[in-house]
Image: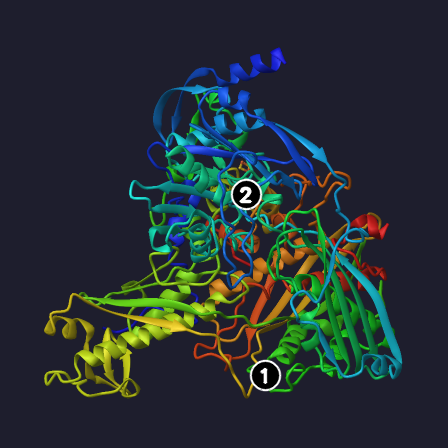
Amino acid sequence: MTITAPRIGAALDRVEAPLKVTGAALYPNDVSYPGLAHAAPVRATIAAGRVTAIDTAEARAAEGVIAVVTALDAPRLRRGPVTLLGISPPAPLQDDRILHYGQYVAVVVADTAEQARHAASLVAVEYAEDVPMLDIGDPRAEVEDDPWGMDVDRGDLEAGLAEADVVIDETYATPDNTNNPLGLMSTVAVWHGDGSLTVHDATQWPHGVRMSLAETFGVPESRIRVLAPYVGGGFGAGLRAWQHVILAVLAARETGRPVKLVLTRPEMFTGVGYRPESIQRIRIGATRDGRLTALAHEAIAPVALEDDNFEAVSHTSARAYACPNVMTRDRQVRLNIPCPGSMRAPTEAQGNFALESAMDELAVDLGIDPLDLRLRNFAGTDPLTGLPWSSNALRECFARGAELFGWSRRTPEPGSMRDGHWRVGYGLAGASYPPYQVPCQARASLQHDGSAFVRSAATDIGTGTYTVMTQLAAELLGLDVARVRFDLGDTDMPYSPQAGGSGLTGALGNAVRSACRQLLQAFLDVVADDPESPLRGLTLDEVEAGGGGIHRAGDPGSGEAYTAILARHDLAELSADGRSTPPTPDTTAWAGAFGARFVEVRVDADLGVIRVARVVSVIDGGRVLNAKTATSQIVGGTVGGIGQALFEETVTDEGTGRIANATFGDYLIPVNADVPDMEVVFVGGPDTATPLGTKGVGEIGLVGIAAAVANAVHHATGRRLRSLPLTLDALL
Amino acid sequence: MKTREEALSRLGASVGVEFGVNGVRRRVGVEGRVTLLDWLRDELGLTGVKKGCDQGACGACTVLVDGKRVVACLMLVAQCDGREVTTVEGVAGVGEAGAVQDAFVRHDAFQCGYCTPGQIMSAIALIGEGRAGTREEIAEFMSGNLCRCGAYPRIRDAIVDAAGGEVG
Ligand code: FES
Ligand code: FES
């Protein structure tokens, strides 16, 4: 009964790893059914106007075609509900209006995928075309101020700028970036004879998909089952029940066949969200000795005409530094574009680039080391509330990072460091990601053989959820990890929110913790009057779990095994539910994650080629549940940040709204040779805001990289690039 | 228009081919337009072979054809006559002398796992070709396999380890 396997915090290998390395893990598009039919969408080739005619004759006559449903003849479908992530996307094929390029105008169902794709190419659509609004500056576009009610005014900005010795006033730009998880978004939909529905979907939120489909198709949620045990990444693209999910379910209903719909890579650029472009003006005022007197961050970004997203780009700047006079502003412009959504580190990916670039510019103007400038303006308490942080190890991040990176070797003069024909630049950026948690539920069962089964309808999009929840439950129940199974990705399990916003580990971890505690309580209840039990009459506070059972706290010899209790009371199993709710600390400010990013770039002196040569990341991620998977999150986020910094830009054709680079050949993401080896270190301790003490680490790994790279490029070359991605043509 | 129709109808026509998949001889009649990738997945149920782009740009569908790396989305079944195709299902599994697979697990060389079968097939070929000598070499020759989760440094660690080198 001794515990040998590693538990919380330990670098346990992923529990599902054997399935992934042998190709046995079943992703939604790996699922098949007898009689499976395949659907392919037809997309609009204009960005604004109306469909005037759709000729489906040729498509219907093509071999293998079972059905064609168009925007002119589709049945009425209701729009999904407003959820905790906001409004659902509009139901597809509901009228003749075209609001963006790539909008679905028909769906074809055939016996094979090849037949469906071919027949889709035979659908002839005629349009009456309008001039689309595609530019953020289009005077016809509707502009919304403060769309999320998060704008901040603190102190007196003008007075703060007036008292400054130095003022930075610059504008930064970030382009559209497309999530591009490697797994193509896929849905397999099956209507059963009893009117119930099973959907396999590459979603980050099975319950969200279920809610949406229930509303759209008028089916009770209890008759819908959504499954997503493995998902080929998401990075935000799987947060919503996008229109293709509804098309697949509609196609299955219309044909009476199980239907699979797999988006193509080009379709992934117009149908599953993306990080929207931004234009950001930053003004910072400071005294000669580097104390901030004023900070203004004004951001503008586009959104679709009849859909919404959450992208409060400027907000976090209000809590980034100790500064008495602060203003943040967000504005949205409605355009004829596919709806932007969340992409890894939403809001901070863009906002941090502008703020941390501007801080570097200020440091240069003042002649102060960029590291010192950040430390001088460290926010020791939360600037928004004035309360002490629930935890904040940002200063330690900077100190440790500087030491590991060798920041002191940096000579401040731009262009002063060289290695042969490479110009060498050192850059850094501070990073933070705001906390997020929503209610979650979980269930824990102890089987008669003493093993445990714990579950919740969450997803593991690669973050390590399977593994860390297994470790957590093992520790809380006093079992070896090999005796615990944690399962997820099925709406027949207790409710879970989405994997997103770095909120799942906290929400789910605290729910699993609660379920395991409740389960211990259930055992104590069973033996409350049991004269044979050494645990008789004890309360939860008086016991501990360990060695496959429960014993008096501090006295492992005085207790008994789960198996003994279950056997004596004729129980095949004992189960308990747990739930978590967001923390509401009233004496501290809920902090979120922090980090310091140190980057070395090398810029070819003749060609301007920029390479990221070295990255050191020190992260305050609260309590780390698994060193291995948490490190992978930071490494992966850093790679996303390198992509944002150097490569990624979704290009929209000016006249038509067509995405001009909608393939992996044209939309560049980092490849193996673009990514250096990197050092990742965690500092800080458990966050005090929740019982579990974790902070999410899915987003923070990306935050700060683009700014640190841009700052390093400035240090290497003396050239300040304020527009992403940073490409060599800007340096020539 | 006529020629397009003709060309398309030829693509839809059945072609007879005989070849090996993971050591099993297969004689099949298949539409000329069907890719090796779709056929392996849809006909044989070898769904360890992944589709990330269908355009030859991501490497998720990497298989070995006569021992050489091939992206299965750019090869037609009709081109496979007389060849031997190996997928991730056809190489050793975890703990059965699957040194590369074991190393991927130990080094956490993946996250979502979607690119992983392709990475592993490339890694096996790379080691076999003697091109896994240095981290730089591995980085270069593994750059045809995209990983959007960003596991690249750990993929290098795993391959160095599996190839018997010192993990830096
Ligand atoms: S699916 Fe074949 S290379 Fe991407
Ligand atoms: S592990 Fe997700 S794409 Fe590589």
Viewer-proximal residue among A385 and B53: A385
Viewer-proximal residue among A79 and A373: A79
Q: Amino acid at mark 2?
A: Pro
Q: Chain of mark 2?
A: A
Q: Which mark is residue A633?
A: none
The answer to whether mark 1 is within 8 Å of ligand 2 is no
Q: Could you say which quadrant of the image residue A155 lies in?
A: bottom right
Residue A8 shows in the view: no
Say which residue appears at 37% left-offset and 34% top-offset.
Answer: A257
- x, y percent for residue A82: 52, 59
Mark 2, secondary structure of its residue: loop
The answer to whether mark 2 is within 8 Å of ligand 1 is no
Q: Amino acid at mark 1?
A: Trp
Q: Which residue is mark 1?
A: A389
Which quarter of the rendered image does ligand 1 occupy?
top right
Could you tell whether A95 is left or right of A479 in the image?
right
Q: Quadrant of the N terminus of chain A?
A: bottom left
Could you tell whether A252 is left or right of A269 in the image?
left
Say which residue appears at 62% left-offset and 47% top-offset.
Answer: A671
**Label located before the other in sequence (2 or 1):** 2
Q: Is residue A716 above or below residue A566?
A: above
Q: Which residue is mark 2?
A: A92
- x, y percent for residue A407: 72, 72
Say which residue appears at 37% left-offset and 62% top-offset.
Answer: A456
Residue B160 shows in the view: yes
Q: Chain of mark 1?
A: A
Mark 1, secondary structure of its residue: loop
Neighbour tally class for label 1: few under 14, some 14-19, many 20 plus, Cα within 10 Å:
many
Q: Is residue B60 above or below residue A204?
A: above
Q: How much space separates mark 2 and mark 1, taking CA atoms?
A: 45 Å
Could you tell whether A652 is left or right of A390 in the image?
right
